[in-house]
Image: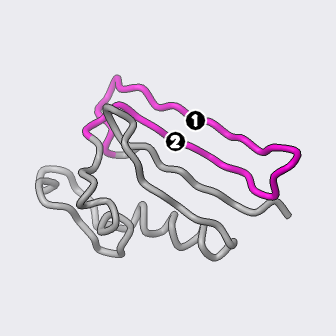
Amino acid sequence: MRHTPAGSEIRLSLTAGASSDRATLIVADNGPGIAPADRQRALDRFGRLSGEGEIKGHGFGLPLVASIVRLHGGSIELGDAQPGLKVIVSLPIA
């Protein structure tokens, strides 16, 4: 969300089915997105992507989210929101 241009749309969706033992949170925007080849690196600490020189940051945001999600037994996936980025977080329901 930090790299989403001003005036862009950010969508949130939370689902947890009665027959599922997991909850899924989807955060999507219509910003520039992340190329499929760069998505795994975007989850790595200090994994700054090329072309981000004009955007300040240290590469902590998504890696921090990924670490917290994994510590709670969940998973995180980056996808294409066409346009934009879609972050899919799945967590076990305690």
Query: Which residue is tagged 2?
Result: 27
x 38%, y 67%: residue: 43
- Magenta stretch contains residue 24: yes
Graded by Cα atoms within 10 Å as few (under 14), some (14 to 19) or many (20 or more), the crowding at tag 2 reads: some
Instruction: Give the left or right position of residue 70, taking residue 59 as reference.
Output: right
Query: For numbered disc 1, what is the local secondary structure?
Result: strand
Looking at the rendered structure, the kind of residue marked 1 is Leu
Graded by Cα atoms within 10 Å as few (under 14), some (14 to 19) or many (20 or more), the crowding at tag 1 reads: few
Quadrant showing the N terminus: top left
Question: For residue 69, which quarter of the picture?
Answer: bottom right
Color encoding of the figure? one colour
Residue 34, image x, y percentages: 27, 50
Q: Is residue 74 above or below residue 2?
A: below
Q: Counting residues from the N terminus, which is met first, the one under dot 1 or under dot 2? A: 1
Instruction: Give the left or right position of residue 21, taking residue 25 as reference.
Output: right
Quadrant showing the C terminus: bottom right
Q: Is residue 71 above or below residue 4?
A: below
x 34%, y 66%: residue: 40
Query: Which residue is tagged 1?
Result: 12
Residue sitting farthest toward the top: 7
Residue 62, image x, y percentages: 42, 61
| Boundaries of the magenta span | 3-32
Residue 21, image x, y percentages: 81, 58
Instruction: Give the left or right position of residue 80, taking residue 94 as reference.
Output: left
Residue 18, image x, y percentages: 88, 45
Q: Is residue 52 above or below residue 27?
A: below
Residue sitting farthest toward the front: 19
Instruction: Give the left or right position of residue 58, taking residue 81 as reference.
Output: left
**Disc 1 to disc 2: CB gap under 8 Å:** yes
